[in-house]
Image (tube, rainbow, N blue to C red):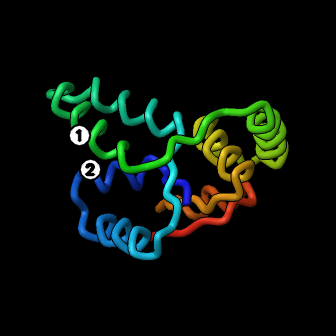
Amino acid sequence: MLLDTDFLIWVLKKDPAALSKLEEMKDKSEAIAISHVNLWELYKGAYKSSKPKEEIKKISTLISFFTLLKFTKKIDQEFGRLLNQLNKDGKPIGDLDTLIASIALNHNKTVVTKNVKHFERTGVKTESW
């Protein structure tokens, strides 16, 4: 499983449905991963908040439980291909989400997100909560 940033934000907000989904994944002993894109988006939000130090501490604690997937040349190539294909089809989803989709495709991961329709355009398997 590759977590989308929206899921991580809801976990940080202690949303019962997101926390339940996280427990479900842990109970199934599923490999749960995040990407650098998640970190960029989470830290952007932390520095935008009125209490950045507190938010950064929460993020650091949360992400310590997950595997951080590294970028590869194959992901870079997939990103270029996918971004151009989505734009050509008139169905772009934004660069960062396209990058998350590229990472998921490269690592054969399901993306856990509320933006299911958004990611389905990429051919990525998705799961909501």
Pointer 1 local density, CA inside 10 Å: few below 14, some 14–19, many at least 20: few
Q: What residue is shown with label 1?
A: 58
Label 1 with label 2: CB-CB less than 8 Å: yes
Q: Is 111 left or right of 5, judged from the image as shown? A: right
6 lies above or below 88? below
| Label whose residue precedes the other's in the sequence (1 or 2) | 2
Which mark identifies residue 121? none
Instruction: Count the marks.
Output: 2
Identify the residue under disc 2: 12
User: Going by the image, does 89 lie left or right of 1?
Assistant: right
Horizontal placement of 84 versus 97: left or right? right
Task: Please name the residue shown 72% across and 33% down the image.
Answer: 72
The picture places residue 66, in percent across and down from the top left corner, at 43, 49
Q: Nearer the viewer, mark 1 or mark 2?
A: 1
The foreground one among 30 and 115 is 30
- Is the residue marked by circle 2 packed among few (<14), some (14-19), or many (20+) residues within 10 Å? some
SS at mark 1?
helix
